[in-house]
Image: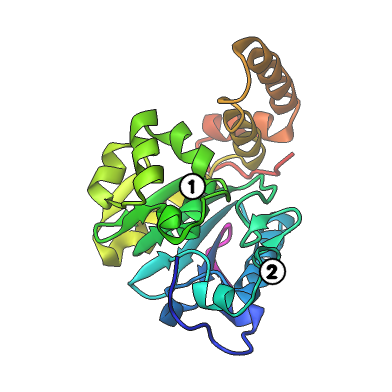
């Protein structure tokens, strides 16, 4: 949670920015560094709009979510705004939940580029992404219980899915954070790098994903994301459906043809 003063009359267009990195990668930045990128009402509106823009743009295949500055990826909900009377509803959207992001329907791959502290709602934003690259200086935690609150934006149940149950319960009940090395050892982050390499590493991974067949990536992610909630019989049935859809696609013909002709494939996404 952040205890920093929120700016007055924030513009959603500037507190969350979007820029393209090459043809298929988008970088979405939480841009409130003086408030440790805490989630305000304006940031929620801005992030929800950026998610829609990414998901609606067929040329974007991968998105990177990061925070401005070096101190924090996101310090959670803006406690100053809360103390001034802002409600939870102002920091959430009906379909996206907290920050317009944690429950938002997303088909594309989202990578968290964690440049600093990812705590409270900030950690929940990271847990809502598909993978993460972190600075060696990053920390991760759910300190809500220290403020009389609870990590109900996904943290309470997503964390036990990602780490051993006992460790998740300790983090949730004590509110104490862990460092980047511990997070990597637990499988919470994919890569831990020097602070100046965080975004570069995330972009490298995003480009690798973006070079692959978009339909195959999207359908594979859709199935993989449901692996924890469905039994093997159901998953096998869904896998057969995915196989049929992919094998009937233009991309399934283009991939082997490009390999045989020793050229880069030209994906159609269909």
Q: Which residue is depicted at the point 65% across and 79% down?
A: 13
Residue named by callout 1: 127
Question: In the structure shown, which secondary structural element does the residue marked by tag 2 occupy?
Answer: helix
Label the magenta part by its dominant secondary structure.
strand
Please identify the residue farthest to the front as the structure is shown: 148
Q: Do callouts 2 and 1 mark residues in contact (Cβ within 8 Å)?
A: no
Residue 269 located left or right of residue 186: right
Q: Which residues are magenta?
A: 18-25
Residue 134 visible here = yes
Residue 6 located left or right of residue 190: right
Q: Residues within 10 Å of mark 2 (few under 14, many from 20)?
A: some
Question: In the structure shown, which secondary structural element does the residue marked by tag 1 occupy?
Answer: helix
Please identify the residue farthest to the bottom as the structure is shown: 8
Residue 221 located left or right of residue 92: left
Q: Which residue is depicted at the point 62% across and 85% down?
A: 10
Q: Residues within 10 Å of mark 1 (few under 14, many from 20)?
A: many
* 191 and 157: which is toward the camera: 157
Residue 31 in the image, given as x and y percentages of width and height: 50, 76
Q: Which residue is depicted at the point 58% across and 41% down?
A: 265
Asked where in the image residue 172 lies, by quadrant, the reply is: top left
Q: Which residue is depicted at the point 70% across and 44% down?
A: 268
Asked where in the image residue 42 lies, by quadrant, the reply is: bottom right
Report, in whole angstroms, how far the alpha carbon at label 2 lies from the one at label 1.
Answer: 21 Å
Q: Quadrant of the N terminus?
A: bottom left
Residue named by callout 2: 90
């Amino acid at each position: 949670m952040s205890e920093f003063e929120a700016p007055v009359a924030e513009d959603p267009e500037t507190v969350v920015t979007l820029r393209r990195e090459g043809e298929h990668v988008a970088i979405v930045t939480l841009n409130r560094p003086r408030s440790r990128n805490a989630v305000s009402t304006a940031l929620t509106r801005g992030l929800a709009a950026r998610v829609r823009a990414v998901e609606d743009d067929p040329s974007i295949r991968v998105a990177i979510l990061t925070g401005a500055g070096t101190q924090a990826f996101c310090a959670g909900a803006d406690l100053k705004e809360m103390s001034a009377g802002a409600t939870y509803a102002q920091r959430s959207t009906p379909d996206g939940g907290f920050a317009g992001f944690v429950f938002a329907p997303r088909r594309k791959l989202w990578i968290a580029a964690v440049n600093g502290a990812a705590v409270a709602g900030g950690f929940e934003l990271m847990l809502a992404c598909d993978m993460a690259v972190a600075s060696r200086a990053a920390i991760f935690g759910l300190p809500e219980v220290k403020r009389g609150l609870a990590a109900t934006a996904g943290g309470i149940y997503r964390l036990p899915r990602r780490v051993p149950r006992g460790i998740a319960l300790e983090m949730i009940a004590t509110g104490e954070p862990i460092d980047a090395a511990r997070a990597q050892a637990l499988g919470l982050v994919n890569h831990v790098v020097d602070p100046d390499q965080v975004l570069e590493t995330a972009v490298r991974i995003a480009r690798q994903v973006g070079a692959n067949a978009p339909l195959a990536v999207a359908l594979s992610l859709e199935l993989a994301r449901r692996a924890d909630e469905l039994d093997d019989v159901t998953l096998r049935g869904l896998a057969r459906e995915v196989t049929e859809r992919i094998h009937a696609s233009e991309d399934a013909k283009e991939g082997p043809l490009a390999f045989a002709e020793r050229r880069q494939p030209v994906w159609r996404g269909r």
